[in-house]
Image (cartoon, rainbow, N blue to C red):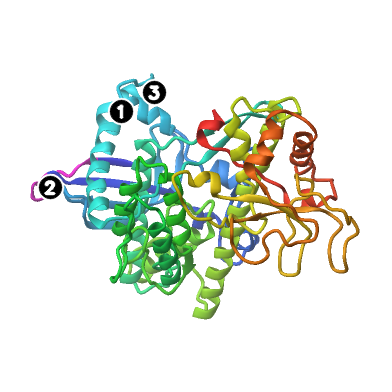
Amino acid sequence: MWAEPDPDPANEGGWHILVAIADVSWYVRPADALDNEGEKRGNSVYFPDRVVPMLPEALSNELCSLKPDVPRACLAVHMWLGANGHKKRHRFVRGLMRSAARLTYEQIQAARDGAPDATTRPLLDNVVAPLYGAFAALSKARAERGTLDLDLPERRVILDPQGHVARIERRQRLDSHKLIEEFMIAANVAAAETLEKLHQPCMYRIHDAPDPAKLEALRKFLEGLEGVGLRLAKGQAVRPRDFNRLLQQAAGTPYAAMINELVLRSQAQALYSPENIGHFGLALRRYAHFTSPIRRYADLLVHRALVSGHNAAGEDFGEGESPKMPLAAFAAIGEHISQTERRAAAAERSAVDRYTAAYLAARGAGRCEFSRPHQWRDAVRALRHPRGERRRWAGADRQPARRLLSLRGGPASPGRPPLPAGLPSGRSRDRTPRRGQSSHRRPYLQDHGRGPRQGRWQGAQPRSTAAIAAPCRQGGKRQDEWCKTAQAALNPSSRTPAAKTRAALQIRPDVEK
C-alpha cells in the first residue's frame, strides 16, 4: 500500500494511491486440487489459538505473503483521487512488487502520533504522511456518502504460552485500522467497476436494505423509551445516515450499546451474488471483494475475472483466467461461500465464548467469584440462545437492564431448542420426564410478562437475575453448579447437553479489565 500527492496540476490537492494484493490466481488454477478445496472451505477461519486456512500455509504464509525486500507476484490497482476523496480514474496492473517494510497497525499509529520506532522513523515523511493524507480525503468521501457507522466493541482473547487465557481485552479501533479499511474499500469498488466495464461476471458483495418489519419493530421499541426522545425516520426510504443520526442521539446515554446492537440486528445480511443490488451499509452502488484472495474464495473469483477481462481487452495479463460457466452455477458458488462465511463467523464467536467461559471459571479458582456485584448479574444476562444471539427485550424504564431478562427452568418442548443443562433452575417435585421430554433440566431465557407460558411449565419457578446473582455472590451450592456447567462446556469429550450446546458467557467491556 502506497500513496503520494498527485503531481497533475489539474488535480490540486489530489492523491495517487496504489493497493497491491498477492496474486493468488497465478498459483491456484481453476479445477485443480487447491481450487476445489478452497471453494469447499470458502474462507479461512480465525480462532484465538489457531487459524484454519482456506489454502495451504505454503501459499498463505510464504508465496502469497508479503515480506520486506522479497519480490512477490501481485495484482495491483492505481487510483487517482480528488481532494474530496472521489475517485477520478483507476488502472489495474499485474506484476511483481517488493515491499519496503511489514508494519503493524500499532506501529503505524504510534509513528503518526509522534512516537516512531527504528523501523518507522525513516518512513515518516515519504510513506506514513502521504498515507494519512490520502486517508483524510477518502474519509471526506465516506462522510459524504453517509455510510453506516456502528460502535460495537469486540473482544480479543489473549492466550499464554500454555494455551490458557491470560486476559480478555477490548479490541482497539485505531485510525490506522480505518486507513487500511478505506484503501481496501476503494480498491474493491474499482474492481467491481472494471469487471462491469469489461463485461465479465462479477461476484458482488451485496447488502440489501433492512426489512420493513424489523424497522417497524425497532421504531416501536424506541417509542417505549420514555423521556429519551430517540426516533427513527418514518414514511420514507431509510438510508444509512438515518441510522447514524439515531446512533448519535443515543451516544452518551445508558441506551447507547443497546441501540447499536438493535440497529445491527435490524440490518439485512451481506451476501455474495452475481446479481448486483448495491451495498446498503457502505452506501455504494457496486461493490466486490478483491483485497483478500488468500482467505476468501470470492476474492479469488474476482481476481480471475480481472485477468480474463484484461486479456480479452488485448492486454497481456497472463494465465489464471476464470473458466466459463453458466450463470446458475456461478450463483450457486455465491450461495455456497455465503453459507461458509456464516458458518465460520458462528464458529469464531463460539470459540471466543468458550474461552471467555474458561476465563471466568478460572478467575476464582473454580468458584467464579467476582469482585463487583454487578458482574454476576451481567454474566447471567449474557447467556446465549444456542441458535444464535436472540434476546427478547422486555421493555424499558429508567433501569431497563434490571428488567431485561429472567432465567426460568423447564424441560424442553416441541419446537423449542434445548438449552444448556446444569444452570440454576426452579425446583421440581416430578423429576421423571414426560414422553418426548428430556430428563435434563434446562433454563430458558424468557422476558417479563410475555405470553401465557410464563411460569406454567412443569415445575418451573420464575427466578429473576437478581435472585440468582445474590446467592452466587455469597458462594454456596448454586454458584458451584454454575461454575461446573461452564467448565463442562469446555470439555469436548463430555456427552452432557452442556457440551452440545456450549454454554457461553459474555461480559461487559468494563468487566473484562
Q: Secondary structure at mark 2?
A: loop
Measured in 3D between alpha carbons, the distance from the residue under mark 2 to the one under mark 1, in whole angstroms, is 26 Å
Looking at the rendering, the stretch of residues picked out in magenta corresponds to 4-12
Q: Position of residue 384 (x, y in %)?
A: 64, 50
Residue 136: within the magenta?
Answer: no
* Figure check: 255 above or below 41: above
Residue underneath mark 2: 8
Q: Quadrant of the C terminus?
A: top right
What residue sits 55% from the left and 77% below the top? 329
Residue 11: within the magenta?
Answer: yes
Give the crowd class for mark 1: few <14, some 14-19, many >=20 residues within 10 Å. some
Residue underneath mark 3: 119
Which quarter of the figure has residue 198?
Answer: bottom left
* Figure check: 153 above or below 441: above
- Of residues 403 and 191, the one nearer the viewer is 403
Q: Which mark is residue 112?
A: 1
Measured in 3D between alpha carbons, the distance from the residue under mark 3 to the one under mark 2, in whole angstroms, is 31 Å
What residue sits 38% from the left and 35% below the top? 174
Q: Quadrant of the N terminus?
A: top left
Inspect the image, locate mark 2, and give the three-letter code of the amino acid beneath it: Asp
- Of residues 501 and 480, the one nearer the viewer is 480
